[in-house]
Amino acid sequence: MRIELTKGYVMTSDAHNLILNESSVTKSGRVRLRPVGYYSDVSGLVDGLISLKVRHSKVRSLKGLIQEQHALIEEIRRLFR
C-alpha cells in the first residue's frame, strides 16, 4: 500500500503496521521515504500526522494553529471520501 496523504507525507504498510513516511525527492530525482511513525490503525496514523504537522507549524497564534489543524483535517477527510 502507498497512499499520498498531504504534501510531503505518504502512508505505507508492512505486515504489522501502517507507516507514516516523510517524502522527499533526491538530487537524482528519486522519491525517498523516511519513516516517522508506526501505527496499528488509520486513526492513529492520522492523529500522528496532525500532531507532527502542528509541532512543525510556524504559526504564531492559537487561532492560526487551530485554523491550520482544521484545514489539515479537512484535507485528510477528502482523501477518505
Image (cartoon, grey):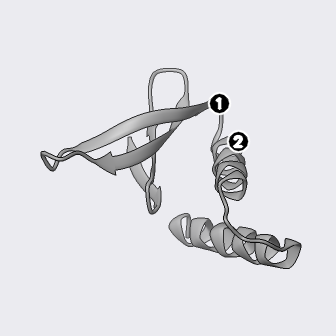
Q: Locate residue 21, reporting x and y percent.
A: 47, 41
Query: Which residue is at a point 67% across and 61% down the rendered structure image?
Result: 57
**Is 39 placed above or below 11 here?**
above
Helix, strand or loop at disc 2? helix
Q: As drawn, is 28 to the left or to the right of 36?
A: left
Front-most of residues 55 and 12: 55
Residue at the farthest top position: 15
Classify mark 1: residues with Cα within 10 Å, few (<14), some (14-19) or many (20+): few
Q: As drawn, is 72 to the left or to the right of 69?
A: left
Helix, strand or loop at disc 1? loop
Q: CB under 8 Å between callouts 2 and 1? A: yes
Query: How far apart are the alpha carbons under marks 2 and 1?
Result: 7 Å
**Is 17 placed above or below 59 here?**
above
Classify mark 2: residues with Cα within 10 Å, few (<14), some (14-19) or many (20+): some
Amino acid of disc 2: Gly
Number of marks in the image?
Answer: 2
Query: Which residue is at a point 71% across and 57% down the rendered structure image?
Result: 54
**Is 6 placed above or below 74 here?**
above
Residue at the farthest right position: 62
Q: Locate residue 45, reporting x and y percent.
A: 64, 43
Query: Which residue is at a point 43% across and 39% down the rendered structure image?
Result: 12
Q: Locate residue 13, reporting x and y percent.
A: 45, 33
- The residue carrying mark 2 is 44
Amino acid of disc 1: Ser
Q: Locate residue 42, reporting x and y percent.
A: 63, 44
- The residue carrying mark 1 is 40
Residue at the farthest left position: 28
